Amino acid sequence: MNFNIRTVDDDFDLSKLRDFMLKQPQFYPEYHDWIDGVCLPGITSGNREAIVVVSDMSVVGDVIHRTNPDGTIEIRNFRIDPDYRNMDLGHFLLTQVKRAARAKPKGRVITDVSVQNFAGVEFFTRNGFHIEGMGELYKPGQLEYKFAWAA
């Protein structure tokens, strides 16, 4: 199996990323609106960076992150297609984000994961993130863990 891992730099990749994001399971309300109204425009404008894993012309994984005003990198979307998990693709994507964080004075990465997303919680914990807190970030009654990693 061959993979191509690259940043999203053109409309073709952006369209493939959108298709992938819409077909993946999600835990957040109004996710479709966020994709089209915040996420993709942020990538296009350069306010967010997207790295995709492509196999056979289809996106099978992504990480989308931004740098907050305090220099912390925030992962806003992280997904690997279930058929492509356990191939170290997620670990590779996360390593790219950590590398970018090490180049910043703060050297810190944050993200949130639904408490219902057991695979996501386990993945970030296994990769050196720790839970800093928990709260209702997106929807009343739905809890998310606030994760952090520091260089």
Image: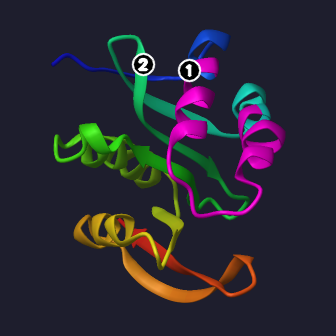
- Could you tell me the amino acid type at mark 2? Ser
Sooner in the amino-acid sequence: mark 2 or mark 1: 1
Residue 34's disc number: none
- Residue topped by disc 2: 58
For residue 117, side relative to residue 138 (left or right): left
In magenta stretch: residue 26: yes
Q: Which residues are magenta?
A: 15-40
Query: Quadrant location of the N terminus?
Result: top left
Q: Are marks 2 and 1 in contact (CB under 8 Å)?
A: yes
Does 97 appear above or below 57? below
Residue beneath the point at 56% across and 16% down:
13
Q: Position of residue 106 (x, y in %)?
A: 52, 65
Q: Nearer the viewer, residue 46 or 40?
A: 40
Q: What is the chief secondary structure element of the magenta stretch?
A: helix
Q: Secondary structure at mark 1?
A: helix
* The quarter of the displayed image where residue 89 is located: top left
In the rendered image, residue 132, in percent from the top left (x then y), is placed at 48, 86
Horizontally, is 35 left or right of 60 in the view? Answer: right
Question: Residue 32 at what x, y percent from top left?
Answer: 73, 45
Secondary structure under tag 2 reads strand
Q: Is residue 38 magenta?
A: yes
Residue occupying image coordinates x 52% and y 59%:
105
Instruction: Provide the residue designation for mark 1.
Output: 16
Q: Is residue 28 left or right of residue 150?
A: right
Examine the rendered structure and indicate whether residue 58 appears above or below residue 68.
above
- How packed is label 1: few (under 14 Cα within 10 Å), some, or many (20 or more)? some
Please tell me which residue is depicted at 57% across the width and 47% down the height of the picture: 65
From the viewer's perspective, is 134 left or right of 33? left
